[in-house]
Amino acid sequence: MTHSKKSRLRNVLICLGVVVLLSGCVTSSDSRFAREADEDKAVRNYVQLATAYIGQGNFDRARNHLERALEIKPDSPSALAAMGLIYQREGDSQLARESFSKAVGNDGSYTRGRVYYGAFLYDQKEFEGAKEQFLKASADTGYEDRGSVFFNLGRIYQRLGETGNAIDAFQRSVELSRGEPSALLALSTSLVQTDAYTEASRYYSRLMTAMQRNRQMQHSPESLLTGIQIARFFNEWDREASLALVLKNQYPESDQYQQYKALISNDQ
C-alpha cells in the first residue's frame, strides 16, 4: 500500500472514530433524558394518586405512594408538600413544617407548595409567615387558582387588622374568580367595616343574585348580618326585618345574632 493510500485510510478511520464517538455521546444523552423524563412522570403519577387518597382521608395509601415518589426523587417539591399535608392532617405540626419548608426551599416557583405552607401557617396562627407565603404565591400569574390565593390573603390581612389591604385582596379575588360567592361576601363585609356602604351594597347585590340562581346556597350568619347592616344604612326596614328573622330562627346562638341584638339595643 502506498504512503498516500495509507494516509487516506488513516484519515477515514479517524473520521469514522469521531462519528462513532459523537454517536455514542448522543445515545447516552438521549438515554439519560429519557430516564429523567420517565422518573418525572412516575413522581407526578405517585403524587396525583397520593393527593387523591389524601382527599379521601386514606393517609396510609397516600403515604405509600409518596414514599415511592421520594425514593425516586428525594427532593421532589410536590411529593414533599403532599407529605406535609399528611403530617398536618395527622397533627404532626413539626414534621409538616419541615416538609413544607423543604418543598418551597427546593423550588421557590412551586406555588402550590407555598399555598399549602401558607395555609398551614395560618392554622398555626402565624399570620405574618402565612402572609409572606401567600404574597409570593399571588405573584404567580400562571397559577390556576389565583382567585383563592387572593381570598386567603384577604383573610390573613383581616386577622392582622389590615382592613384596607384585605379589601384590595378580596377585590382581586372577586375579579379573578368572576364573582365567587365567598369572595363577594368577604368583600361586602370588609367594606361595611369601613363604612363604604354604597360599594358594599353593590357587591352584596351580586351575592344575592348568585344565591337566587343557585337555590342550594344558603345564608350564613355573616351574610345575614352584613345584609342587615347594609339595609339599616339605607333605611330598608322591611329587608332588615326579614334578614333579622332568618338570623334569629336559624342561628340564634351565633356571634352575629348577638351582634345584631347589641346593634338594635343601641337604638333603644
Image (cartoon, rainbow, N blue to C red):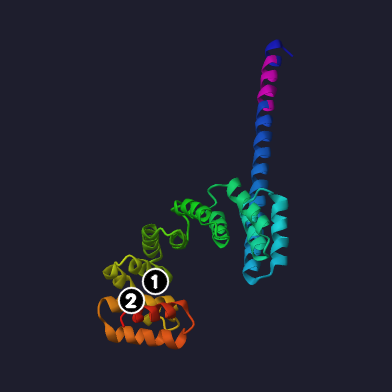
Position of the C terminus, as image quadrant, is: bottom left
Task: Please report the bounds of the magenta region as a residue range.
Answer: 7-17
Q: Is residue 162 above or below residue 255?
A: above
Name the residue at 52% across, 56% down. Answer: 130
In the picture as drawn, the residue positioned furthest to the front comes out as 268
Name the residue at 65% across, 39% down. Answer: 29
Out of 256 and 52, give the one closest to the viewer.
256
Classify residue 169 by image quadrant. bottom left
Name the residue at 65% across, 52% down. Answer: 98
Q: Residues within 10 Å of mark 1 (few under 14, many from 20)?
A: many
Give me the C-alpha separation between circle 2 and circle 1.
13 Å
Mark 2 residue type: Gln
Query: Mark 2 — residue?
Result: 229
Instruction: Where is residue 186? Give x, y as percent.
Output: 40, 68
Instruction: Where is residue 10? Give x, y as percent.
Output: 70, 18
Local SS, label 1: helix
Out of 82 and 118, give the one closest to the viewer.
118
Tell me if I can see residue 209 in this picture. no
Q: Is residue 151 left or right of residue 109?
A: left
The residue mark sitting in front, 2 or 1, is 2
Q: Is residue 226 above or below residue 20?
A: below
Query: Mark 1 — residue?
Result: 185
Local SS, label 2: helix
Label at residue 91: none
Instruction: Where is residue 7? Give x, y as percent.
Output: 68, 15
Q: Main secondary structure of the magenta part?
A: helix
Tell me if I can see residue 12 in this picture. yes
The reply to whether the magenta stretch includes residue 8 is yes
